[in-house]
Image (cartoon, helix red, strand yellow):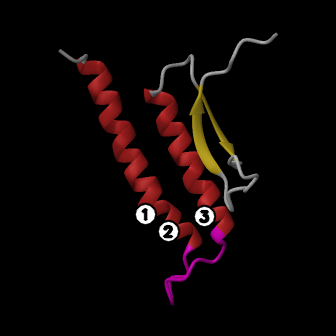
Amino acid sequence: MANAIFNKLLKELIDNFTNSFINVSEGLFKNQEDNNLIYPGEFGLYREAICKRFLKFIVPQKLSIDTVFLINSNDEVSTQCDIIIYQSSPKR
């Protein structure tokens, strides 16, 4: 059985996440007259920060959460920052 306190905190976090991700971000970065993004880059960064805060609550502390550009085996780089969850390898 899940912990009642954890469930209450998670519900609050989900409610805050949903409100910030949809309502607040669009209110801050969308032109109300034509519904176009004013600052697309900042809009994305704001939403990524919201996602990282949410993930930090549910991802085990032994894992790290960061924002990075991804590089594939063909040396192609992603065109935007992405959120990754990873476990650091021990230092040699």
Q: Which residue is drawn at 52% across and 30% down?
A: 56
The verdict on residue 31 being magenta is: yes
Q: Which label was assigned to residue 43? A: 3
Q: Give the range drawn in magenta.
A: 30-40
Of the residues shown, which amino acid type is indicated by label 3? Phe
**Residue 23 — which label?**
1
Residue picked out by circle 2: 26
Which residue is depicted at the point 38% across and 52% down?
18
**Type of residue at label 2?**
Glu
What's the distance in space between the residues labelled 3 and 1, CA to CA?
A: 12 Å
Q: Distance between the residues labelled 2 and 1?
A: 5 Å
Name which residue lies at 39% across and 38% down.
Answer: 13
Mark 1 element type: helix
Q: Nearer the viewer, mark 3 or mark 2?
A: 3
Please say if the residues under marks 3 and 1 sit with CB atoms less than 8 Å apart.
Answer: no
User: Which quarter of the figure is the N terminus placed in?
Assistant: top left
Q: In this view, does 29 lie above or below 58?
A: below
